[in-house]
Image: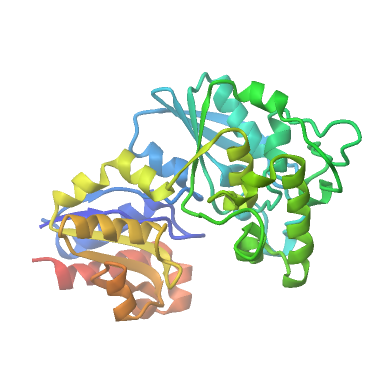
Amino acid sequence: MRILVAPDKFAGTLSAVEAAAVIVEGWHRHAPDDQLSALAMSDGGPGFVHALASHLDGELLAVSVSGPYGVRVPATVLMHDGTAYVEAAQACGLHLTPADRRDPEHATSFGVGELIGAAIDADAERVVVGLGGVAANDGGAGLLNALGADPGIGSGIDLRAGAAGLAALVDGSAVDLTWAYRRIGDVELVMASDVDNPLLGLRGATNVHGGHRGIADERKPAVDGLLERLALATDRSAADRPGAGAGGGLGFALQLLGGSRRGGVELVADVAGLAVRCAAVDLVLTGEGAFDYSSRDGTVVYGVAQAAGAAARPCVVLAGRVDVASREMRALGVEQAYSATDLVGGEAALGDPVGSLASLAAKVARQWSR
């Protein structure tokens, strides 16, 4: 039997590359003669560069950039055929700071701008920025500053690296992007994200995703107001574009600089040849840490399930936890889903993610391998 293993990361425990390898190993415990191929996937969030590096024969450049609170952190730029791939979460990811120490109103995206600058310095003709899983909700103000944006004398907007995040945004009138435009030059910018929210309002970055970053409900109106000040000082119309709210407003900043938007799952699927790979197998496996009602359009599970369906192949999900009923599961294009928590218990699954996922894969193999 031929099987394609194409999971997302299992957040906080396994990268997509690691999860795919574990599923393959667990499956072979029961069906050693089955032919399994691994295909790490990503939606543009944490693990984006790692997943792409497993598909592309590119060069990984090690760099050091500013983290969400100014401390230097390691990051990588993946160079392949004139295109640089970078991951916003490496510079300002939520995972870089313990939950009880996060301060989203002071977190900055400055390091993301430094990553883009490193890619430009490496002679990239195109820079693809994976968005998602970021701690900053600064509308990309830090990114713009790192690339040379100047708030101008008397503007009232402080984009200096030392004035981090939303705390730096005060009443202002204009931000000069001339030097940022010159820094970008003819380089094509692409944001890889499936978030289509605008920057502001009820569907904006703060109200929809700010809670995940730690912004309290009572602070959301004030935070949204600060982002509107940035929009008014740059280009208010850009704040309404689909995807402007991605990555805490990084999408807004990238679109200000001429960036275009591409679905993260779609981009990785194209690079990895997902459609062709699905058509060449009998069964497609995907997975993530929690298969729940957020696992819809724009997620790896949904994207893989749709590709499997287009090839008329069944798609099965292996997850740490499954919170989706059968009807909704089938609406997503998933034939069946299996939970490691149900198999070994919640504490055991968290304590031994490798062992529990491998055991789950062996169980699924007993039901699906011919």
Instruction: Locate residue 95 relative to residue 52 in the image: left or right.
Output: right
Image position, residue 95 (x, y; %): 60, 54
Q: Is residue 110 visible?
A: no
Q: Could you tell me which residue is drawn at 16 percent across and 73 percent down?
A: 367
Q: Residue at x 55, y 56 (%)?
A: 197
Instruction: Determine the residue located farthest toward the front in the rendered image.
Output: 237
Taking the image as shown, residue 315 lies to the left or right of residue 157, namely left
Q: The N terminus appears in which quarter of the rendering?
A: bottom left
Q: Residue furthest left?
A: 370
Does 325 appear above or below 56? below
Residue 305 placed where, x, y %?
28, 61
In this view, the residue in front, 308 or 345, is 308
Name the quadrant of the C terminus.
bottom left
User: Where residue 310 sits: x, y (%)?
Assistant: 20, 56
Asked whether, in this view, residue 94 is left or right of residue 167, the answer is: left
In the rendered image of this protein, does residue 172 appear above or below residue 297? above
The image quarter in which residue 79 lies:
top left
Q: Nearer the viewer, residue 188 or 282?
A: 188
Residue 149 in percent (x, y) is at 74, 31
The residue depicted at 35 percent of the width and 65 percent of the height is 357
> Would residue 300 be visible to someone looking at this image?
yes
